[in-house]
Image (cartoon, rainbow, N blue to C red):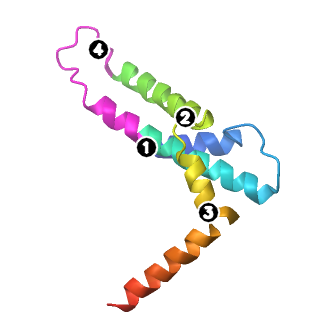
Amino acid sequence: MTGIEAVLSRTRASGSLGPAIPGSGETNELRRVAQEFESLFIKQMLDTMRSTVDRSSSLLHGGQAEEIFEDMLFEEYSVLMARTQSFGLADMIYEQLSEGGAHSRSEAARAYEQHSSAF
């Protein structure tokens, strides 16, 4: 199971990444999915950052057990960062996909249609 699949399965099993948001169920679901996406994005960023660390000359490298622990730790970090809304990516996604972003979506749809009809 990849890191993304692990985060997805854990967040689906836990239900929600953050506190309940007042409003309709669809709005809550959209907010939850936006937070899940932000968590996945952060996890990928942290994994990429971790892969740049040279561990070949490390005296205290714990082998496979340390790698598994670090992967689980960074998954939790990504969920926590998404929950605290420190990045703001979930808010931007939510705004674009919610009713507040309807005007932008229609503009994007028109631009796509114009671009695709040119070919």
Residue 1 visible in the snapshot: no
Task: Tell me which numbered mark, 2 or 4, is placed earlier along the sequence.
Answer: 4
How far apart marks 2 and 1 lie (CA) works out to 25 Å
Residue extending furthest toward the top: 59
Looking at the rendered image, the disc whose residue lies closer to the viewer, 2 or 4, is 2
Q: How crowded is mark 1: few (under 14 residues within 10 Å), some or many (20 or more)?
A: few
Q: Kindly identify which residue carries mark 4.
A: 61
Point 69% across, 38% down: residue: 14
Please report the bounds of the magenta region as a residue range: 44-63
Residue extending furthest toward the right: 23
Residue 91 visible in the snapshot: yes
Disc 1 residue type (three-letter) = Thr
Q: Kindly identify which residue carries mark 2.
A: 86
Looking at the rendered image, the disc whose residue lies closer to the viewer, 3 or 4, is 3
Mark 2 vs 4: CB contact within 8 A: no
Point 60% across, 39% down: residue: 10
Rendered location of residue 33, percent (x, y) = 62, 52
Disc 2 residue type (three-letter) = Ser
